[in-house]
Image: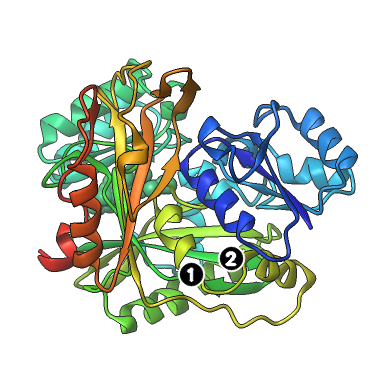
Amino acid sequence: MKVLVIGRGGREHAIVRQFARSAFIEKVFAAPGNDGMRLEAELVPIEEMEFQALAQFAKEQKIDCTFIGPEQPLSAGIVDFFESQGLRAFGPSKAAAQIEGSKTFAKELMKKYQIPTAAYATFSEIAPAIDFIRQKGAPIVIKADGLAAGKGVVVAGSEEDAIAALHDMLEDRKYGASGSTVVIEEFLDGEEFSFMSFVYNGRIYPMVISQDHKRAYDGDRGPNTGGMGAYSPVPQIEESIVDETFHKIVKPAIEAMAEEGVPFNGILYAGVIVTAEGPKVIEFNARFGDPETQVVLPRMKSDFGDFMYALMEGKPFDLEWQEQAVLGVVIAAEGYPEQPEKGKLLPNLAGLSGVDIFHAGTTATSEGFAANGGRVLLISSEGDTVKAAQEKVYEQINSLSWSGFMHRSDIGWRASNPN
Ligand code: AMP
Ligand code: GLY
């Protein structure tokens, strides 16, 4: 089989690598990909939103399956377009991608089908939104309704911070049109985890769970980012909670989408907080998480190409995962997430041993790889436990000098110190 992976981040590098390892895949293409993927994929200089050119390429190269990484092309209908051209693509339709693209859509679906989630209200005017915040008090959560690359969420510790966030979104349009409507949500207190599943024609294959670190700085402080590191498994989340999440959240959501006439195919990502009342949804994504993918996919023991083929053909498959833990730390450009500095040269990565490296915002230069985006790399390691993986990865990271870059030094801390 030949596959085409669409996207250019660390998540797509993990997808590319997993396909490249498959005995059933003869060739992996990435469009546009990034320079760090060149050993595993042939890069195709077509951007994610150029549907016509991508489909043309898939036809010419006789691609068996196109796998879409990021949310933007999904929300814009890339899968519908590919299918209309007789091409096979893995991901949700434009209508189904609304589960991520519109928080209002997701919230209404959950309300209708009694899927546990934080209480919420939606506003596009500032005055009633302020009244609502005054009435509910802090902590409280303000979210831009549309896509904002994981950054359109403010967990406000005070009413003043909440109101400032409202001004940023509704008046100053900090997140553009994505913030013209805001969702104000009850603050959920508890351990958080990411539960991703492969879904196709009603069949669901859950993956092992993971935990992301969304805040920019150590101790889970600072602004929300796309994610600063992740690990899998999440030992502090009991198996019974994972089961309950599957039966009360994931399966009902997929059935609800079918019931609504917008069946979901692709990766359903549920972001969950385990509250005193049980697991509740904080968000759905219609795609793989980044950086969760980089720590989850490498734990797949089954052949990824073999699995994807069986999934799309409707054949039963026994999807297996390894016991070994994986922990990954994001290296970001200094200034991320507000103003990442571009162009800084990375230290020589050949000096690292026993780690996996996933490239995101890098470009190859004559002197080595340079930063070309907010999140630059993810460096991961395996271990018998999360702690062992953590020690290994930090020992390697600390062996190099990272001036011009930033990374958290405590990824995985909750695995040994929950709450
Ligand atoms: P989201 O983009 O919706 O996943 O939100 C980003 C991060 O903000 C989440 O990963 C949580 O850590 C936090 N968050 C979002 N919604 C809530 C909530 N209702 N209660 C507590 N924390 C939240
Ligand atoms: N890491 C969270 C996300 O991909 O949305």
State which tag comes first along the sequence, 2 or 1: 2
Query: Measured from the top left, where is residue 58 in percent x and y?
Result: 82, 41
Q: Amino acid at mark 2?
A: Phe
- Residue type, numbered disc 1: Met
Asked if one can make out residue 259 in the rendered structure from this viewpoint, the answer is no
Q: Is residue 342 above or below residue 113?
A: above
Q: CA distance from mark 2 to mark 1?
A: 7 Å
| Residue under numbered circle 1 | 207
Query: x and y percent of residue 244 in the render?
Result: 38, 80
Q: Quadrant of the N terminus?
A: bottom right
CB under 8 Å between discs 2 and 1: yes
Q: Which quadrant of the figure has residue 135?
A: top left
| Residue where numbered disc 2 is placed | 198
Label 1 SS: loop
Tell me if 402 is positioned left or right of 69 in this view: left
Residue at position x 27%, y 27% from top?
166
